[in-house]
Amino acid sequence: MSDQRTVERAPAKLNLALHVRRRRDDGYHELETLFVFAADGDTVTVTIGAPSLSIIGPFAAGLDAGADNLVTRAERAFAREFAVAATHAITLDKHLPIASGIGGGSADAAATLRALARLHRVSPTDARLFAIAASLGADVPACLLGRAAIGRGKGEALEEIEGLGDMPALLVNPGVAVSTAAVFARWDGCDRGAMADGDAPAAALAGRNDLQPPAVQVAPVIEDVLALLGAQPGVRLARMSGSGATCFALFADMAARDRAAEAIAAAEPAWWRLATVIR
């Protein structure tokens, strides 16, 4: 970091478990979810300079760099809240697939807020940052925190927990974008109960993703991804993240993860894959 420029990672977010409890009167859903984060994802670079947003990287083509982009909205909200007169040139290096259940846009907005806070010497725990994050989307506060946590309410009421300690993981997306609204619209309205107590691995293994069945209705290929991941040797857990379509598998060791990545690349070369660790 310099006084004029800073770089922030925007790691992929995973929901190890996602329990939908009820539909709220405000139209949102009451959730209990276990957030964890990968070591890898997008990158946001913020430089003090003429205002702009440039999007590069393998998934840049699917994004609009206009005023409605979450990165732009985060910058605008930060400047307004903290009375920042400087303007910013922002570059988003986009490596996470879009509308894929791993918080790409939310992670990018959160990374933008962290970068701006560093540039302008705002504490990363400042409550105003989290208020901005909550105004941008339900997953943005968790991505701003960037550590393992239980999310309640819309997902924005966070309780930090012990994470997975760099557990090997493989993320796979079959190349389909899934609408969160379409998935929630197909949720059957059945409350299947609260998340179990315990550490992150125990809560994840005892949990479920209530959006997985409706997501499969929207994109049946998700079932194929889960079947292929679940069949790999050394898998501890295979599940869909968020509202899909990205699925993940947690592994006992790096070698098992890497063999699985090779097997899936051979079977489905067009699918996006990320071999990483989950914290």
Image: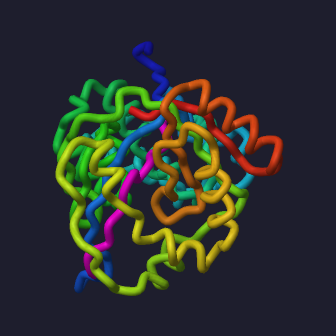
> What segment carries the magenta color?
10-22
Apparent side of residue 205 relative to residue 227 in the rendered image (left or right): left
Q: 244 above or below 237?
A: below
Count of labels in the image: 0
The residue depicted at 31 percent of the width and 56 percent of the height is: 206
Q: Does the rendering let one see residue 54? A: no
Furthest residue to the top?
2
Q: Nearer the viewer, residue 120 or 232?
A: 232
Q: Does the rendering let one see residue 198? A: yes
Q: Nearer the viewer, residue 108 or 262?
A: 262
Measured from the top left, where is residue 239 in percent x and y? Answer: 50, 56
The residue depicted at 48 percent of the width and 21 percent of the height is: 5
Q: Main secondary structure of the magenta part?
A: strand
Q: 85 above or below 16?
A: above
Apparent side of residue 206 relative to residue 209 in the rendered image (left or right): left
Q: Nearer the viewer, residue 46 or 263?
A: 263
Q: Nearer the viewer, residue 26 or 74?
A: 26
Measured from the top left, where is residue 97 in percent x and y? Answer: 64, 50
Q: Quadrant of the C terminus?
A: top left
Measured from the top left, where is residue 47 in percent x and y? Answer: 50, 27
- Examine the structure image and report whether residue 18 is included in the region drawn in magenta: yes
- Classify residue 218 by image quadrant: bottom right
